[in-house]
Image: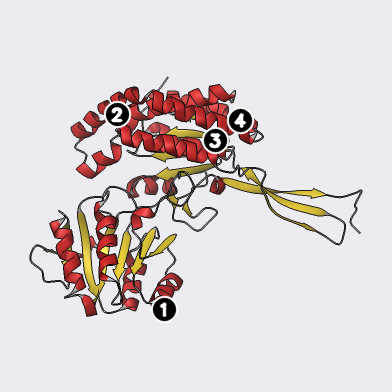
């Protein structure tokens, strides 16, 4: 048998098992799903030493592969980050169950009573790159929303994802739920991704979580509907009415807290009226913080001249593009041209300016006077996220358990007939 044939057979088997599991999950009681997630959290914490040992193998693989420091940071698991995974699992477990929620109900003059209720999507395929915590986040959210999931992690996080997945399976077993509800593709072979994208008989939606290359591949090749999670080309506009202290706190946190996540700021836009005052102070603070500033319209020692390629670029590193703009309209024009519709922010004390920024831009997340690193489902109260959807169909912004549902209509009569 050719390798591609064996991969196709492997993925078809995963798909059949996931579809069967999804039928059972669709009506699993809320308390049973909660028990599974709490048991999974217990297992992650109990097995943290094994997870860290598996992660050390992945870190060495990443180093040998030449991953950047920011990408290695995305890959790293330590006890604090594992505690974050545990807390995320417990937070999802504690949320209200979205399945069966009545979204709307009404009576018709014909005597019909109609309800629109939330229902699982079915089987979700999640394709992600180096962040092993996605294994837990995606598994938990799909389970909570009554969906089976097929996880295909990146080659860099292969061992970490396996160790975390084993804990999720322990949770399923403890709750008496089908172990096939959360499956992990057991190979690094890229043919598995190609197969997953075309499994229309078994998979209801694909969620890609990664860089532009991965998302572009999925959008080109998928025959299954896609929730696109595009790169985070995140802008911050510092308005002339910005509070200097707030601006400094927000810009530094947005860029330097973690440079390798999709909510990290990648472009700083500065109103010309404050370019030589607050703008200069911000640039100096970034440089002092170890950030390379690629600037246009800013003549400060330590900056590097920006090129056209620096606009609309996701650096995922200690690099930021910076530009002086004439006014709010200039900032909006720049963002419309180069944004990936992920997250964009304005820093201002002017309510009218903030209102205009919110009205004229259509990114999935728009912020005012807050770090863009809050662009995260956990920070939005969702417990975790499966990604930030940047498209406009179905789910948009952080995709939590509720966003992983569709709906159906339940129509009741009393021997009612149509004239």
Q: Position of residue 254 (x, y in %)?
A: 29, 57
For disc 2, the neighbor class at 10 Å (few under 14, some 14 to 19, many from 20) is many
For disc 1, the neighbor class at 10 Å (few under 14, some 14 to 19, many from 20) is few
The tag earlier along the polypeptide, 3 or 4, is 4
Say which residue label 2 marks: 55
Q: Position of residue 46 (x, y in %)?
A: 40, 23
Say which residue label 4 marks: 32
Q: CA distance from mark 1 to mark 3?
A: 43 Å
- 270 and 217: which is toward the camera: 270
Q: Nearer the viewer, mark 4 or mark 2?
A: 4
Quarter that holds the C terminus: bottom right
Say which residue label 1 marks: 352
Query: Disc 3 on helix, strand or loop?
Result: helix
Labelled disc at residue 143: 3
- 138 and 286: which is toward the camera: 286
The tag earlier along the polypeptide, 1 or 3, is 3
Query: Disc 4 on helix, strand or loop?
Result: helix
1 and 2 marks in contact (CB < 8 Å): no
């Amino acid at each position: 048998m050719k390798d591609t044939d064996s991969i196709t057979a492997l993925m078809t088997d995963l798909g059949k098992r996931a579809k069967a599991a999804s039928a059972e999950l669709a009506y699993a009681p809320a308390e049973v799903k909660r028990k599974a997630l709490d048991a999974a959290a217990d297992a992650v914490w109990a097995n943290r030493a094994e997870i860290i040992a598996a992660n050390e193998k992945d870190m060495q693989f990443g180093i040998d592969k030449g991953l950047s420091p920011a990408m290695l940071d995305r890959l790293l698991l330590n006890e604090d980050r594992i505690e974050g995974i545990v807390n995320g699992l417990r937070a999802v477990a504690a949320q209200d169950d979205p399945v069966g929620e009545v979204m709307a109900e009404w009576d018709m003059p014909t005597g019909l009573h109609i309800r629109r209720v939330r229902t699982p999507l079915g089987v979700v395929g999640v394709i992600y790159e180096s962040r092993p915590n996605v294994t837990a986040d995606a598994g938990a959210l799909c389970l909570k929303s009554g969906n089976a999931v097929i996880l295909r992690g990146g080659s860099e996080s292969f061992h970490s994802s396996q160790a975390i997945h084993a804990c999720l399976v322990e949770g399923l077993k403890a709750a008496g739920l089908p172990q096939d509800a959360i499956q992990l593709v057991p190979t690094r072979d890229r043919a598995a991704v190609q197969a997953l994208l075309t499994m229309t008989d078994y998979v209801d939606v694909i969620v890609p979580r990664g860089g532009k290359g991965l998302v572009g591949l999925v959008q080109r090749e998928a025959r299954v509907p896609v929730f696109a999670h595009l790169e985070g080309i995140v802008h911050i506009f510092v308005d002339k009415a910005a509070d200097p202290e707030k601006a400094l706190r927000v810009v530094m946190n947005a860029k330097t807290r973690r440079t390798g996540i999709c909510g990290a700021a990648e472009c700083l836009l500065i109103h010309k009226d404050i370019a030589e005052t607050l703008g200069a102070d911000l640039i100096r603070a970034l440089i002092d913080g170890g950030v390379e500033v690629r600037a246009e319209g800013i003549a400060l020692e330590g900056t590097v001249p920006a090129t056209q390629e620096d606009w609309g670029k996701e650096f995922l590193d200690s690099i930021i593009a910076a530009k002086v703009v004439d006014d709010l309209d200039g900032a909006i024009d720049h963002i419309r041209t180069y944004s990936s519709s992920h997250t964009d922010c304005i820093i201002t004390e002017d309510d009218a300016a903030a209102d205009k920024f919110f009205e004229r831009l259509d990114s999935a997340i728009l912020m005012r006077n807050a770090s863009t690193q809050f662009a995260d489902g956990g920070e939005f109260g969702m417990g975790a996220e499966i990604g930030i959807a940047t498209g406009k169909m179905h789910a948009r912004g952080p995709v939590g358990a509720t966003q992983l549902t569709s709906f159906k209509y339940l129509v009741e009569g009393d021997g009612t007939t149509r004239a």
